Amino acid sequence: MIVVLTGTNDYLRTKALADLRSDFVDKYGDFDTEKLESENITFDKLLGSVVSIPFMSERKLVVLRGISSLGLSTEQVDKLIEASGQTTDLIIDEPEFDKRSSVYKKLKKQADFREFTKLESYALGKWLIAEVAIRGGSIDLADAQHLLGMIGDNQLMLSNEIDKLLSFDTKISRQSIDRLVEPVASSKIFDLLHAMFDGNKQRALELYNDQRRQNVEPHEIIGMIAWQLHVILLVKYSQLNKISNIASFTKLNPYVVTKTSDLTSNLSEQKIQYLVSRLLNLDYDMKTRSIDVDDAVQNFILAI
């Protein structure tokens, strides 16, 4: 049997792998289990592990991290499928396939193929509340959205933050979130934009320099500012009134939509066009001229 686990949702994919391995160990024990990294093996080594008979139990489990880097042919994949049907279970953990490849097409058709994508905002909020409850705590919807706004849609990071918050208090509140959770860079960039639009240039520069002290490069900051401007455009011109409708239409987190709506309420179309134009010019200069990028980004912040 071959099971393929793929997709950008690292948390759900990792959990599925752990569950499959746990089920196997419960049934057959952990004597005949093997983990392989595709970067460190050849196809012959992989095939040898799959075809070798179990030593201490009825079946053997082989977990392969990645398969794309092996550059297998269709014939080699056929050999793997044939070999794994006897006494070996093969689990392939591949975060991202080239969907044009013959390996992807063959495995999707003939293996137990499971794809794990990131949850949309509403589903993520429900998952967060339920996960906190499963771990013995509680969090209300507003505070869950606040946490999502600070961390984003990475369930693996959210899971770690849940454990940290619950170790402090089983009732997760906005106060404990603000005290214990370090916002991801994109959340800090939102605060930077807010300071820029409020005319608080000193605060905007402080936030920029804070990102630089954390080794966030200027081009990364520009990229995040560009993304935030994209969000601003989506929210401002969605022609919808309710936060829930805007979030559903744009596929954005409701908390992000709420913060962005507050930010855009006093932004004119001319102001947004000016920002986009300045950002495009800055990006062009960074890519085509020899300039001090730090100074250029700070001048951009001061000019808004």
Image: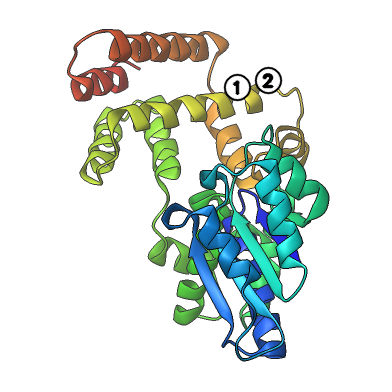
Across and down, in percent, residue 127 comes to 70, 63
Residue type, label 1: Leu
Report helix, strand or loop for mark 1.
helix
Image point (59%, 52%), residue name = 94
Residue type, label 2: Tyr
Location of the C terminus by quadrant is top left
Q: Is residue 39 above or below residue 17?
A: above
Report helix, strand or loop for mark 2.
loop
Residue 171 seen in the current view? no
Task: Give the side of residue 302 with respect to residue 12, left or right.
Answer: left
Q: Are marks 2 and 1 in contact (CB under 8 Å)?
A: yes
For the residue pair 16 and 196, the one nearer the viewer reads as 16
Across and down, in percent, residue 229 comes to 51, 24
Q: Which quadrant of the structure image shows residue 124? A: bottom right
Q: Is residue 38 above or below residue 243?
A: below
Disc sitting over residue 233 in the figure: 1
Disc sitting over residue 8 in the figure: none
Q: Which colouring convention does the figure follow?
A: rainbow
Name the residue that disc number 2 marks.
Answer: 237
